[in-house]
C-alpha cells in the first residue's frame, strides 16, 4: 500500500511577505530596506504617524490651557481693563453664555477701563498667553538617499465673539504679536444697525501654522481707531 506523504502546513503569507518582492524592486525603497532593518523602518513610520496625528489643546479665556493650566494674562503695565463677561452687570454687551466656550469670555473696549471712560490707548487692553509647540511632521523626500525633511507642525487659532448688529456701532479692530513678530494682518469687523445686540460666536480672528516645537508667546490688543474698538476673547486652540 502506497502512502502519500502529507504536505507540510504553511501559514498564509503575511502582508509584508506578499509585498516584499515588490518593495525590493522599487527605488528608493529598495535602498531603505537594504540599509535598515524592517522593524526599524516600521518603527520610524509609526513614529511619524503618531506625530502627524497630534493633539488639539484649548486655551480658555478664564480656565487657561486645557493641559498645562497656564492662564492668559490681562495685565499690561500694571493695568487691567478687562471684564469677565458672565455676571458682569455693568457690561453693555451680554452674549449668550451657552454659545461661548466653557460658558466664559473676557471683554474690553479701548476707551473704557474699569467701567470708566479712559484715554490710555492700548494700555490694559491686551491679552497674552503662552504655549509650547507640540510636534514635527516628517516628510520623506523620495530621493535615492531618502533624506527626511522636517516641517514644524504646530498651528495656533484664536477665536472671539463679535457683535453682528446693535443699536450702537461696535467695531472690533485687533492687532497681533507672535514671538515678537507684529507682521500679521489686523482683524476688523463692524456691526449692522439693530434694535438689540446680536453676536457671532467662534469667530476665527487669527491663525498661524508651521510653528516650531518650542515655547511661543501670543498677544492680541484691541486697537482704537476713529471709533472705540471692542474685543471679546473666548478661546484659542493649538495642535
Image (cartoon, helix red, strand yellow):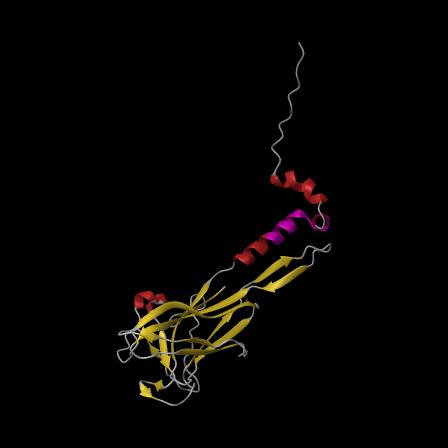
How many marks are shown on the rendered structure? 0
Residue 230 drawn at (x, y percent): 37, 79
Q: Quadrant of residue 140?
A: bottom right
212 vs 110, left or right, is right
184 vs 149, left or right, is left
The quarter of the image holding the N terminus is top right
At x 35%, y 67%, the residue is 100
193 vs 158, left or right, is left
Residue 16 drawn at (x, y percent): 63, 41
Residue 214 drawn at (x, y percent): 56, 70
Q: How would you classify the magenta stretch by its main secondary structure?
A: helix
Q: Quadrant of residue 87?
A: bottom left
Q: Tell whether position 237 is magenta.
A: no
Between residue 87 and residue 204, name the one nearer to us: 204
* Residue that protrudes farthest toward the bottom in the picture: 119
Between residue 228 and residue 131, name the one nearer to us: 228
In this rendering, the answer to whether 221 lies above or below 19 is below
Q: Which residues are magenta?
A: 31-45
Amino acid at each position: 500500500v502506497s502512502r502519500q506523504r502529507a504536505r507540510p502546513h504553511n501559514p498564509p503569507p503575511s502582508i509584508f511577505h506578499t509585498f516584499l518582492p515588490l518593495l525590493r524592486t522599487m527605488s528608493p525603497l529598495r535602498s531603505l530596506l537594504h540599509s535598515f532593518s524592517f522593524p526599524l523602518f516600521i518603527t520610524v513610520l509609526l513614529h511619524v504617524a503618531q506625530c502627524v496625528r497630534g493633539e488639539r489643546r484649548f486655551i480658555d479665556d478664564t480656565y487657561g490651557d486645557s493641559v498645562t493650566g497656564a492662564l492668559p494674562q490681562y495685565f499690561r503695565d500694571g493695568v487691567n481693563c478687562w471684564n469677565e463677561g458672565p455676571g458682569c452687570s455693568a457690561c453693555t454687551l451680554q452674549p449668550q453664555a451657552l454659545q461661548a466656550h466653557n460658558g466664559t469670555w473676557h471683554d474690553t473696549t479701548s476707551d473704557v477701563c474699569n467701567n470708566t471712560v479712559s484715554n490710555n490707548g492700548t494700555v490694559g487692553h491686551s491679552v497674552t498667553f503662552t504655549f509650547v509647540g507640540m510636534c514635527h511632521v516628517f516628510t520623506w523626500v523620495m530621493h535615492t538617499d531618502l533624506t527626511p525633511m522636517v516641517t514644524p507642525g504646530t498651528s495656533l487659532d484664536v477665536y472671539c465673539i463679535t457683535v453682528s448688529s446693535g443699536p450702537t456701532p461696535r467695531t472690533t479692530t485687533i492687532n497681533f504679536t507672535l514671538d515678537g513678530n507684529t507682521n500679521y494682518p489686523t482683524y476688523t469687523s463692524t456691526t449692522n444697525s439693530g434694535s438689540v445686540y446680536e453676536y457671532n460666536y467662534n469667530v476665527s480672528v487669527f491663525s498661524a501654522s508651521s510653528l516650531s516645537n518650542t515655547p511661543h508667546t501670543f498677544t492680541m490688543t484691541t486697537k482704537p481707531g476713529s471709533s472705540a474698538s471692542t474685543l471679546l476673547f473666548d478661546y484659542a486652540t493649538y495642535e
